[in-house]
Image (cartoon, grey):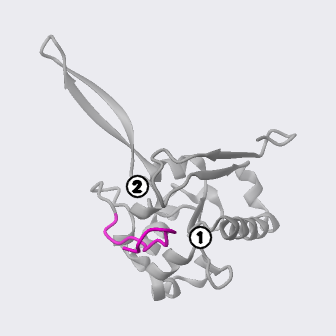
């Protein structure tokens, strides 16, 4: 769906696997310049929190598309033999984590954590610098490494992400250096399925 200005879009996607707990995703795309206004950032935090509560979503991420993509996907180089004895090499993208049941892909500009993640992090959330953590009610916490999304991918931004990941627990996040899944994952409440 597009707005009259063709600047704001909502994109709803069904799950690719069809398996709970992941039941699809909703993306809200807008200009990154919107985030330069403090009033927009405040309204954005409240709007995302309300949408999370409405859909009972345990996780929402907000940031630049390039940053989100670099955290959720990785380029894998592959080769396969041909009839002529030479390998044909190619590249394809693979998920870092398929969905939030496999853990977190990393930190982006805004990371909204619902009850399963708040329980998983526990008191570690309180160890974060106060300017990086904002409670949004009793069941949601916003973790924001930097004030504006344009800091993503900069030396300062990456250093701040590493600092917060070390405080929250690196085992909760995809290891982009070694390409390994998180070893600590949230316990998700899935209706009709036993908790793990």
> In which quadrant will I find the C terminus?
bottom left
Between 83 and 39, the residue placed more toward the observer is: 83
Label 2: element kind: loop
User: Do the residues under discs 1 and 2 have CB atoms within 8 angstroms?
Assistant: no
Using a 10 Å C-alpha cutoff, classify the residue at mark 1 as few (fewer than 14 neighbours), some (14 to 19) or many (20 or more). Answer: many
Q: Nearer the viewer, mark 1 or mark 2?
A: 2
Q: Position of residue 21 (x, y in %)?
A: 48, 61
* C-alpha separation, residue under disc 1 versus residue under disc 2: 20 Å
Q: Position of residue 38 (x, y in %)?
A: 78, 68
Please, what is the dominant secondary structure of the magenta stretch?
loop
The residue sitting at 60% across, 84% down in the picture is 130
Q: Which mark is residue 144?
A: 1
In magenta stretch: residue 6: no
The residue sitting at 79% across, 63% down in the picture is 40
Residue at numbered disc 2:
97
Q: Earlier in the sequence, mark 1 or mark 2?
A: 2
Looking at the rendering, the stretch of residues picked out in magenta corresponds to 182-196
């Amino acid at each position: 769906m597009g707005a009259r200005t063709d600047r704001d879009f909502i994109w709803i996607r069904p799950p690719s696997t069809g398996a709970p707990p992941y039941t699809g995703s909703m993306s809200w795309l807008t200009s990154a310049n919107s985030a330069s206004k403090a009033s927009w950032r405040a309204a954005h935090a409240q709007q995302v929190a309300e949408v999370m509560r409405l859909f009972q979503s345990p996780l929402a991420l907000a940031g630049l598309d390039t940053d989100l993509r670099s955290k959720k996907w990785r380029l894998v180089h592959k080769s396969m033999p041909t009839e002529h004895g030479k390998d044909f090499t190619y590249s394809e993208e693979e998920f870092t984590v398929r969905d939030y049941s496999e853990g977190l892909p990393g930190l982006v500009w805004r990371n909204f954590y619902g009850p399963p993640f708040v329980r998983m992090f526990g008191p570690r959330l309180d160890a974060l610098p106060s300017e990086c953590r904002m409670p949004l009610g009793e069941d949601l916490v916003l973790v924001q490494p930097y004030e504006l999304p344009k800091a993503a991918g900069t030396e300062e931004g990456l250093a701040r992400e590493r600092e917060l990941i070390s405080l929250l627990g690196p085992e909760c996040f995809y290891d982009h250096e070694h390409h390994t899944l998180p070893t600590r994952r949230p316990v998700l409440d899935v209706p009709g399925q036993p908790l793990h």
